[in-house]
Amino acid sequence: MALRTPTLRQRRLGAELRRMREQAGFGGSHLARLLGVTPALVTQMENGKSAVSEERLREIATACMCGNEPLIDALVGMARERETGWWEEYRERLPADLLDVAAIEAHAERVSTYSITFLPGLLQTPAYAASVFARAVPPLPRSEIDLRLAFRLQRQQIVQGGATPYTAFIHEAALRMQFSGPEALADQLGALIDHSESSGISVRVVPFKIESLPGPSENFVYIDGPVPELDTVQIDISFGCPLFDAPADLASYREILGRMASVALAEDESRDFIRSIKKE
C-alpha cells in the first residue's frame, strides 16, 4: 500500500530496513529477488513510501540474516503504528522539523539534553520561551511566536508530567544568559529549581570552572528509543533542528553524555548553584 507523505517514523523504519540490507552486503535488486518482489517496491519500503507488514518485515530480517531480535521487535512495533500524534494539528502551520522533534519525543524511552546558549525548551517558562522566539532573525510576527509557544507547551507535557525520564545538563552560560531582563530570568531559574525536584527530572549544572568542556558548542538532545539502534540525536542550529541516527553519531553523543555526567555538579549541588545565580 503506497503512502503519500511518509511520517518521520515511517522514514526511520525504512532507513533501518536499508541499513539492515546494507549490513548484509545486499543491493536492492538482490534483496528484491530474495523476497520475490520488484526492486521498486524495495526502494519504496526503504523510503517509507510503502507500508511494511509484520510478516514482510520479519521476512526481510531473515533474508538479511539479522539476528537482533530486540531490534526486529521494535521495528515491528513501528510498523504496526496507525495513530497520528497531536503534533499533526500543526502540520502546514509550523516547520516540519519541529513536528519531527515532537514525534520522536512522544515515543522516547528517555530524553537527555545539553544546553549552553539557552535553557532547555522542555523546561522553559512561557515568558522565557516567548523571549527566545522573539530573538529570531528575521523577526517572527507575534502570531507566529504565539503558535510556537503553544506548540512548545504541549511538547513539555511529556517530561513535566513525569511520563518520560528527563536529564538536563545545563552549562553555566545558559543559566546567566538574559533574554528578557533579570526578572524573567529569575522566574525561569525558580521554575527550573522546582522542576529539578520533580520525579523523573534531573537537572545538573556544568560550571565555568570545568577546564575542558566535554562536548560540542551547540545545544543538543539525545532521545533514547526502545533499543539503542533506534536512538536519535537532535541538534539546535539557527536554521532548523537536524536529526542524526547513524551508529557512529549515536556512539559519539553517548560518549559525550557520559563525560558530561562525570564532570557536572550533582543534583543537590546544581540546585544550590542555580539558587545562587537567582539571588544575584
Image: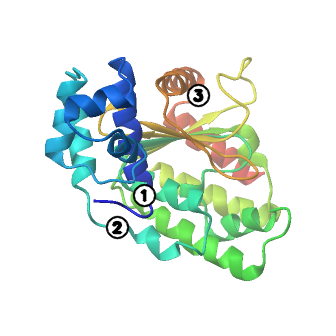
Q: Give the spatial CA distance, label 3 vs label 2.
A: 38 Å
In the rendered structure, find residue 133 and report the number of the disc placed on it: none
Write the residue at 59% across / 56% down. Answer: 121
Task: Give the vertical position of 84 relative to 77 (above or below).
Answer: below
Read off the residue under disc 3.
264
- Of 255 and 233, nearer the camera is 233
Read off the residue under disc 2.
84
Instruction: List x then y, in percent, for residue 8.
Output: 44, 53
Amino acid under disc 1: Thr
Helix, strand, or loop for circle 3?
A: loop
Residue 183 seen: yes
Residue 70 seen: no
Amino acid under disc 3: Ala
Mark 2 surroundings: few (<14), some (14-19) or many (≥20) residues within 10 A: few
User: Marks 2 and 1: in contact by CB < 8 Å?
Assistant: yes
Mark 3 or 2, closer to the camera:
2
Number of marks present in the image shown: 3
